[in-house]
Amino acid sequence: MSVRRLAKEQPASFAFSKATKAKCDWWIAKYPADRKQSAVIPILWLVQKQEGWVSEPAIRAIAELLDMPTIRVLEVATFYTMFMLEPVGTSALIQVCGTTPCMLRGAGDLMAVCKSKIGPKDKLSADGRFTWQEVECLGACANAPMAQINDYYFEDLTADDMAQIIDDFAAGKAPKPGSRVGRASSEPEGGALTLTDPALYDGSAAKPIKKLPNSAPEKAPA
């Protein structure tokens, strides 16, 4: 596992927004009073949704909120790669899967487009709007190659698809996530090949249950 450190440049301070603080309180209330430190992961996530990344002042604020040592919050933030420790693009954080199934299906081409349009990986673009990364398996191997962009999966991508997605984000649009070849979930390209009869799974073919000969009679309602 690579070493993850906080960004060299940090903001002077951090403050929870009113909405974020309300959600933090909701999470804390889910745990016993002496176990509220258990809310550290969802609160780190809420802070990241507010700021785009997790800063050192934010880590200190979370530690104070949860009455836990700052180092404990730092340990969690640096362990899980879902937490960004440096500023990321305000328009899109593009995480291209680089594991074998995606690489075999063209992930390298997607990364080449990202490098050409955005710049080096793991670095904020010159305009501050984009960041792209190579990540490990995102669990959508059947729809390779794919990328997670912000909170959503974009699947069955080509280099042209990636270029268009980046252009759309740059233009302030919201590209539709999902498969670029029209798949539903992970079905074969072109549509499902098995279980095509809805009666096999919608319950319409189920037979009524017969009562056993010696079963006790139903009681009349009171």
Image (cartoon, rainbow, N blue to C red):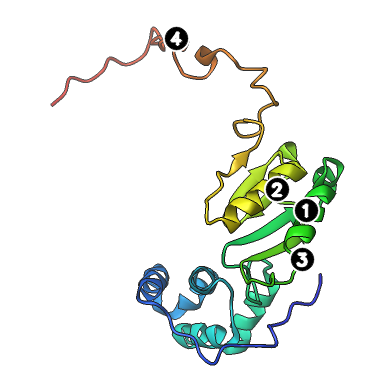
Q: Quadrant of residue 170?
A: bottom right
Q: Is residue 6 left or right of residue 41?
A: right
Q: Amino acid at mark 2?
A: Met
Q: Are marks 1 and 3 in contact (CB under 8 Å)?
A: no
Residue drawn at x 57%, y 67% as measured from the top left: 90
Residue drawn at x 75%, y 69% as measured from the top left: 122
In this rendered view, identify the residue nearer to me: 3 or 200. Answer: 3
Q: Amino acid at mark 4?
A: Lys
Which mark is drawn over residue 207?
4
Name the N-terminal-most of marks 4 and 3: 3
Which mark is drawn over residue 113?
1
Name the N-terminal-most of marks 4 and 1: 1
Q: Quadrant of residue 32?
A: bottom left
Under circle 1, the secondary element is helix
Q: Position of residue 195 (x, y in %)?
A: 61, 17
Under circle 2, the secondary element is helix
Name the N-terminal-most of marks 1 and 3: 1
**Image position of 187 with respect to 212: above or below:** below
Mark 3: few, some, or many residues within 10 Å (few <14, many ≥20)? some
Q: Which residue position is annotated with label 2?
A: 162
